[in-house]
Amino acid sequence: MIEWFTTIAIIVSVVAGLAALVLGGIGRTPDDYSVLPTAAVALVLLVQIVIGLVAPFVGNEPTGDLVEWWIYLIVALVLPVAAIAWALVDRTRWATVVMGVASLAVAVMVFRMNQIWFVQGVALVS
């Protein structure tokens, strides 16, 4: 379940990032509706926290360092929230671009979290 949800989190982050970059590229300043894709990224990460808390107890233990996974998750959650806050305060097109970059950075971080949970620590057999 966590692998499936991680894939969804990556897709949501990439789509939100590309949408914000396109909106910023055409000169659109952030409004209440243009921050919704980045807010969806933060919402997905909140659900990821619940999954991260429950998964080890149902037998889906990580193969890598759990502390590193939680650090990635907390930083990944702070990025879109900070970008949205700045966009709502600044209201320039560059704030929209920052939301896009933050969402794409979250996609990379969630991919790394997936590697920590499933791949890191697993011996490769040749």
Image: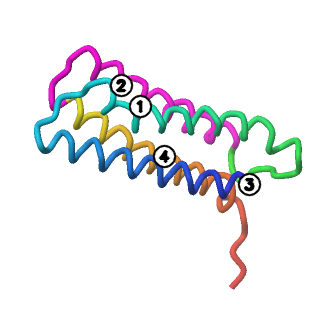
Q: Nearer the viewer, mark 3 or mark 4?
A: 3
Magenta stretch, residue numbers: 66-94
Q: Residue at x 45, y 49 (%)?
A: 107
Q: Earlier in the sequence, mark 1 or mark 4?
A: 1
Q: Residue at x 61, y 32 (%)?
A: 46
Q: Nearer the viewer, mark 2 or mark 4?
A: 2
Could you say where residue 86 lies in the image, as x and y percent from the top left?
A: 29, 20
Q: Earlier in the sequence, mark 2 or mark 4?
A: 2
> Residue 79's quadrant in the figure?
top left
Q: Residues within 10 Å of mark 3 (few under 14, many from 20)?
A: few
Q: Is residue 48 above or below residue 108?
A: above
Q: Which residue is mark 1?
A: 80
The secondary structure that most of the magenta stretch takes on is helix
Q: Secondary structure at mark 1?
A: helix
Residue 85 highlighted magenta (yes or no):
yes
Q: Is residue 20 above or below residue 59?
A: above
Q: Amino acid at mark 3?
A: Met
Q: Which mark is residue 1?
A: 3
Q: CA distance from mark 1 to mark 3?
A: 24 Å
Q: Which residue is mark 2?
A: 84
- Contact between marks 2 and 1 (CB within 8 A): the answer is yes
Could you say where residue 103 lies in the image, as x and y percent from the top left?
A: 38, 41
Q: Which residue is mark 4?
A: 109
Q: Amino acid at mark 1?
A: Pro
Q: Residues within 10 Å of mark 2 (few under 14, many from 20)?
A: many
Q: Nearer the viewer, mark 1 or mark 4?
A: 1
Could you say where residue 57 lies in the image, as x and y percent from the top left?
A: 88, 41
Q: CA distance from mark 3 to mark 4?
A: 18 Å
Q: Earlier in the sequence, mark 3 or mark 2?
A: 3
